[in-house]
Image (tube, helix red, strand yellow):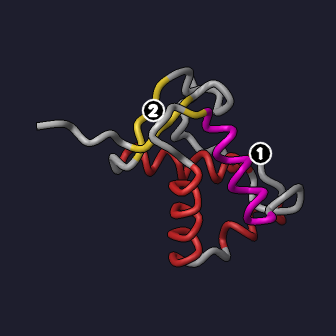
Amino acid sequence: MTTIDEWDDRKMTAEQKSMVDQLSEADIKEIERNLLENASDEWCKVGRIVLTTMIEREEGVTGLPESFFAHRIAKLVKEGLLESRGDASNIKLTEVRLTQKKKD
């Protein structure tokens, strides 16, 4: 079963792979910041967050692939900045939200 954190770069075009390879650490941090800004305290579909971020960044058809953004979301989940639930094999069915602070 595929999980949200399995990034399959074989689905990328050569141009997309080149774009990903050219990203700096600062670029990646900015993308992650954009993803977090588009997340909320309420559960939202990963696909919506990815699409919103892609539109805001003007990635469109010729930009970075959605799987790259989904991979970054998975990293944010692993780091504890986001929580996830749902079918991790499909970013349109998986939901995430900002990690909720535990009440003392």
Label 1 SS: helix
What secondary structure predominates along the stretch shown in magenta? helix
What is the CA distance from the residue labelled 1 to the residue labelled 2?
Answer: 24 Å
Q: In which quarter of the image is residue 58?
A: bottom right
Residue 60 coordinates in the image, percent (x, y): 85, 57
Q: Quadrant of residue 46?
A: top right
Label 2 SS: strand
- In the image, residue 43 above or below residue 8: above
Identity of the residue drawn at 67% across and 47% down: 50
Left or right: 42 with respect to 100? right
Left or right: 23 with respect to 82? right
- Looking at the image, which is closer to me, 29 or 100? 100
Residue 93 coordinates in the image, percent (x, y): 63, 24
- In the image, residue 57 above or below residue 47: below
- In the image, residue 10 above or below residue 88: below
- Looking at the image, which is closer to me, 14 or 53? 53
Locate the N terminus and report the quarter of the image it occupies: top right
Q: Is residue 78 magenta?
A: no
For label 1, the residue is 11
Residue 71 coordinates in the image, percent (x, y): 56, 48
For label 2, the residue is 84
Q: From this viewpoint, which residue is outermost toward the right?
A: 61
Do the CB atoms of the residues marked 1 and 2 lie less than 8 Å apart? Answer: no
Q: What stretch is highlighted in magenta?
A: 45-58
Q: Pointer 1: residues within 10 angstroms few (<14), some, or many (20+)?
A: few
- The type of residue carrying mark 1 is Lys
- Looking at the image, which is closer to me, 70 or 84? 84
- Looking at the image, which is closer to me, 38 or 80? 38
Residue 44 coordinates in the image, percent (x, y): 58, 34
Locate the C terminus and report the quarter of the image it occupies: top left
- The type of residue carrying mark 2 is Ser
Left or right: 44 with respect to 16? left
